[in-house]
């Protein structure tokens, strides 16, 4: 879906990456949320979004076949509405991936409830 997300290695990488991401979210996310609680209070919960970015970074370190790199969004023009080309460096690529992941999880939770 994103040009900056590269997964190589076939189905085994998808399965191992999904398993690793699940383990990171189950074990590491609560620990990161507890450690970052003071920052969450100061930023009114915004830092909890950045814990997902940290988890995705750790995922790319642990799983060799998954990488998130910088990319350029080519832009969109539709009926007078223009989004210009945007360059996403590596940090904002991780933020965008984390944001899209949270939207997908929220949508799936909405479907289940």
Image: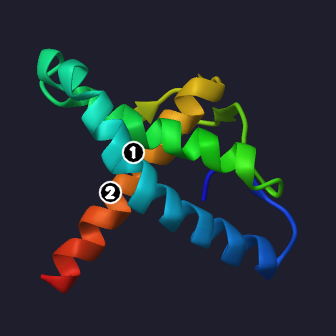
Report the side of 8 relative to 106 (left or right). right
Q: Which mark is residue 54?
A: none
- Front in this rendered view, residue 79 or 37: 37
Q: Which residue position is annotated with label 1?
A: 99
Residue contact at pointers 2 and 1, CB within 8 angstroms: yes
Secondary structure beneath label 2: helix
Expressed as whole percent of the image width and height from the top left, the position of residue 44 reads: 12, 24
- Front in this rendered view, residue 73 or 8: 8
Residue 73 to residue 11: above or below: above
x 49%, y 67%: residue = 22
x 70%, y 46%: residue = 60
Q: On the rendered image, what quadrant is the N terminus found in?
A: bottom right
Expressed as whole percent of the image width and height from the top left, the position of residue 41 reads: 12, 22
Report the side of 107 relative to 89 (left or right). left
Expressed as whole percent of the image width and height from the top left, the position of residue 91 reads: 58, 25
Within the image, what quadrant is residue 10 found in?
Answer: bottom right
Residue 17 to residue 103: above or below: below
Secondary structure beneath label 1: helix
Report the side of 94 relative to 14 (left or right). left
Q: Which residue position is annotated with label 2?
A: 103
Q: Which residue lies furthest to the right in this view?
A: 9
Total marks shown come to 2
Residue 10 to residue 57: above or below: below
Residues at marks 2 and 1, CA–CA distance in whole angstroms: 6 Å
Q: Residues within 10 Å of mark 1 (few under 14, many from 20)?
A: some
Residue 85: in sight, yes or no?
no
């Amino acid at each position: 879906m994103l040009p900056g997300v590269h997964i190589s290695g076939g189905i085994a990488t998808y399965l191992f990456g999904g398993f690793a991401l699940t383990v990171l979210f189950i074990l590491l996310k609560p620990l990161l949320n507890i450690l970052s609680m003071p920052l969450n209070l100061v930023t009114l919960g915004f830092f909890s979004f950045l814990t997902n970015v940290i988890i995705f970074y750790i995922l790319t370190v642990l799983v060799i076949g998954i990488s998130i790199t910088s990319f350029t969004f080519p832009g969109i023009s539709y009926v007078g509405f223009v989004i210009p080309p945007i360059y996403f460096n590596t940090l904002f690529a991780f933020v965008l991936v984390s944001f899209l992941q949270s939207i997908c999880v929220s949508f799936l939770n909405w479907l289940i409830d």
